[in-house]
Image (tube, helix red, strand yellow):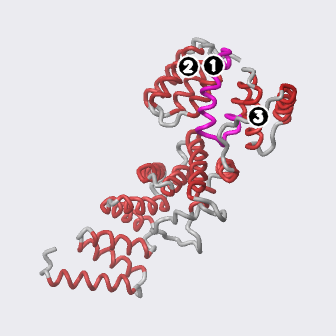
Amino acid sequence: MFIRRHDYATEERLRDRVGAEPHAPQARRALAAWLSRAGRPAQAREALQAGLASAKETASLRHLLGLIFAGAEDYESAERHLARAAAQEPARFDYARDLGLVQASAGKAAESVASLRQAMGLAPEAPADLACLVRIGEQALARSGERAERRPPRPRRRAAVVESLISRNPEAAEALVASPGPPRRVNFAPAKPGYAQAEPGETDAERREVLRAARRALRRLIERHPSYPDLHFGMSLVAEQLGELERAIEAAEKALTLNPRYVQACLLAVRLYEKQGDPVRAAERCRRVTQLEPRWLDGHLRLGHLLREQGLVREAVEAYRGALEVDGSCHEARGRLESLEAALAAEGGDR
């Protein structure tokens, strides 16, 4: 059903959103989808093509653009964009399905059967009509003597399963990258980069494919629920495993912006800033940890280490005293404190 073609208020609101978020694919896609439903496909294509030039993630834009071209019976352009979308996000059932349907409309039976088979492999329960279309395509190929040899890029099964799992249960992202062994309340140690390699014999390239699948699922969830701090926290963990430090820090800070009392995100930020070589920001976040959880011994100890490494001896002394207030028998805190107090005394207390 078409929407009203001259709902200027809605169009202005959507265009304002694009202006405010010029690099966000979801804003461009929302505007283009509205224009298409309003019977203005040419303007919808313009909005999507502008997005392709500016957005960082373009799969969703190419998918919608391909559907709009298909509606205009420009199957060559439709297939080109849908194939790019399916290559960028190979675990998406709807991308593979729509590519196969457009290829069928274009008379490309072999390519269509390959794409629809891939779609069936991605769906937990393939729709009966899709299976019927595949059989029809296979019968047509048998009569012509052709074979469905060409296939779009297909993800390994574990990557597809992980992407589907996290789409339904985003907390699974944390389990994917968690360090093995008994859980600890405070963990400043780097997440072990090989732990996502859960299956025997999995290569580093395969592990990264799984992590990228998790990232895609989280990105889609964030597009729908941008104010959920747990989603940004999960994105930060996955980005850290992929070595994308800037993106990991951005996601952790976003989680903290949404929930300033999110202590696990604060702990993660400490670790990320240390990896980045920014002890000042790491100490700031670590101080926040001690404020949120004043009875956590490790927080005070880590803050003391960070301050001592910056030469902030008096501040480090206070941090180690805070650790001793939590646990007076902590030999590490007592030894560090005595060493720093001796250094201050030797220098005449000038520092």
Q: Identity of the amino acid at label 1?
A: Phe
Image coordinates of residue 81 in percent, x first then y, are 60, 27
Q: Is residue 99 left or right of residue 146?
A: left
User: For the residue labelled by badge 1, is the local secondary structure a helix, a strand or a loop?
Assistant: helix
Q: Nearer the viewer, residue 113 or 177?
A: 113
The quadrant the C terminus occupies is bottom left
Residue at the image position 26 percent from the left and 71 percent from the top = 315
Instruction: State whether residue 294 is above or below residue 336.
Output: above
Which residue in the structure is indicated by mark 2? 45
**Alpha carbon separation for disc pair 1 and 2:** 8 Å
Residue at the image position 62 percent from the left and 29 percent from the top = 63
Image coordinates of residue 231 in percent, x first then y, are 56, 50
On residue 69, the disc is 1
Q: Identity of the amino acid at label 3?
A: Ala
Disc nearest the viewer among 1 and 2: 1
On residue 148, the disc is 3
**Alpha carbon separation for disc pair 1 and 3:** 25 Å
State the extent of the magenta-drawn residues as a range.
Answer: 69-96
